[in-house]
Image (spheres, coloured by chain):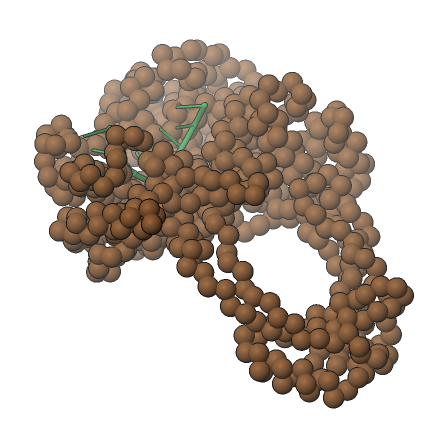
Chain colours: A brown, B green
Amino acid sequence: MKILCVAEKPSISKAVAKTLSADNTRTRKTKAKYIMNYDFKFNFPGYGLCDVTMTSVLGHITNVDFPPSFSWGKCPPGRLLEAPVLEIVSQKDVYGNIAQEARNANILMIWTDCDREGEFIGWEILQAARSTNTNLTADNVWRSQFSHLERTHVLQAAKNPVKLDVNAVKAVSCRMELDLRVGASFTRLLTDLFRKSTVVQLDKGSNLISYGTCQFPTLGFIVDRYNRVKNFVSEPFWFLCVDVKRDNQTVQFTWTEGHFFDRLYVLLLYQNCLKSDQGQVTNVIRKPTSNWRPLPLTTVELQKDCARIFKMSSKDALDAAEKLYNKGFLSYPRTETDQFPATMDLKELVQKQTQDSRWGQYSQSLLDGQFKQPRGGNRDDKAHPPIHPVNYVNTSSLDNDKQKKVYEYVVRRFLACCSEDAKGEQTTVTLQWGDENFTANGLTVIARNYLDIYPYRKWESSKQLPKFDQGEVIKINGGRMKDGKTSPPSHMTEPELIALMDVNGIGTDATIAEHIHKIITRGYVVKIKQRGSEFIIPSELGMGLIEGFDRIEFENISLSKPFLRKRLENSLQDIVDGRTTKEVVLSEVIQLYRQAFVQSAQNGTTLIQACKEIIEANKS
DNA sequence: GCAAGGTC
């Protein structure tokens, strides 16, 4: 029996081949750069000892596009919503390698990532294999299920394969077709529209006004925040507070009611308090408190933290992590999983870090008994473990500054995950004055634990509170009514934008950074520096596009908000779960976009006018 | 030339 195994990327085929063959493979080069074919023997249940070839693709090997007769300028853009769509082999060498290796295979086993896209890539691999070997059918094509590369897990996956999930394949094909139709039709419409007008200079920048189902909601978030900052009106508020002097220290007690926007109301309460010049300590509570160690690292968390700590763009952070992954220092950097598999040997990974001059000693202390199994979050993409260091590298031997920072961050994060929470004691003193309650807090950090290795988070003891006794009566001479005013939100930062995209289902762990980068190159938004911090604000063009689309009154749809993409995400899940079909979802969503397209085409002047007004307003 | 999704 000959079995052809195909993974989604070279690192997986290499690792799986090594495990299944007990490190005994023959390696052949292929025409495709980065891709190797590994030959070895393995005993598959039901098939006996087989000749195995293990290889991989590099993500998708086909793409969708329109026939040449529907290319730019050859048809009205609106036609693209129903034009035929072709599948095109986009990676000929990779496709060719699969076709060649499949010729004499009796069985095909697909080892792509266990997520939706992986299922589709598996289907693409099957098409490539069937192009030379039509004997490969539902009966002899298998799909192995694995979520990490730990040895027993991989062996288990090899011995218990399942069938390709046809529903998941359909869901992805639905997404691909929709993104293409909507993206291409609106991009051509907008580009043609703006080229005819002279409002915006199109020759600088990317020369295109693109529309994408992820690009525009992303732009929408930034414009929305910008407008909220610009239109912010500060509001005054009033509140009560009490200062108590004791042991040469002034303790500030904070009102448990917060603040109110009604001055008279607060004044009334204040006058009520003033009837008495004494307050009473009604409660003194000392209780242990913890500061939790971080969760295992996902891509989105990595990007948010690198933006916050190192002021690194999300794209730079992911690029650096990817380079470190390709050099074998970090695990796969695109993951949504924030829990380690219970079977994974984490201590072995800690052991590799003991040689470092800065965190080696700490790593050793974990191995000497301080090690804690990491906390687990509630996300699991079923395809990759959290990001962690797989091998040690001395950061001074890395030539790239960003890679140094990212590697150190991932290692420290990992060690922090494997540590004890920080422990402290919190003291809360409650003071009653009149009918109002006020509290003062004190924190004493007792054991820093993970904080010692994780400088990216601050948790420090406050000034020690003087002693207060429960029931004690205090003379009040520091009770006051104060005022303040609400302050405007700040402009959008990159970590905030990533978080917004993440919770709204805009893009994936692998693409969020690209979408942000894309709307920058399109000239829709710019990064600015203000008081040492970096913010993303919209350009006049970006604001005009969102404002224009918001002025057109679409039915049941907004082209600038995230709801439609989120709804599509739900519909795709319904296809996977068999509650609906690709055809139903396609026709429903296309119908929505067709209405929006017609209205956009009719209201082109509204779009242009919105841009014009914003440019004019900025001049004055 | 357009999208978003994989991966290098």
Query: Residue A476 or A431: which is nearer the viewer?
Result: A476
The residue drawn where x is 13% and y is 51% is A602
Query: Residue A385 or A471: which is nearer the viewer?
Result: A471
The residue drawn where x is 29% and y is 53% is A547
Residue A8 seen: yes
Q: Residue furthest front?
A: A620
Is residue A56 positioned above or below A490 on the image? above
Give percent across and percent down for residue A511.
41, 37
Give percent across and percent down for residue A446.
82, 52
The residue drawn where x is 70% and y is 27% is A352
Residue A156 seen: no
In this rendering, would A200 be left or right of A383?
Answer: left
Query: Residue A360 or A320: which is nearer the viewer?
Result: A320
The residue drawn where x is 87% and y is 68% is A246
In this rendering, would A419 be left or right of A328?
Answer: right
Q: Residue furthest right?
A: A247
Give percent across and percent down for residue A429.
78, 71
Quadrant of residue A507 in the image? top left
Q: Quadrant of the N terminus of chain A?
A: top left
Give percent across and percent down for residue A601.
15, 48
Quadrant of residue A88 in the image? top left
In this rendering, would A569 be left or right of A39?
Answer: left
The number of discs equals 0
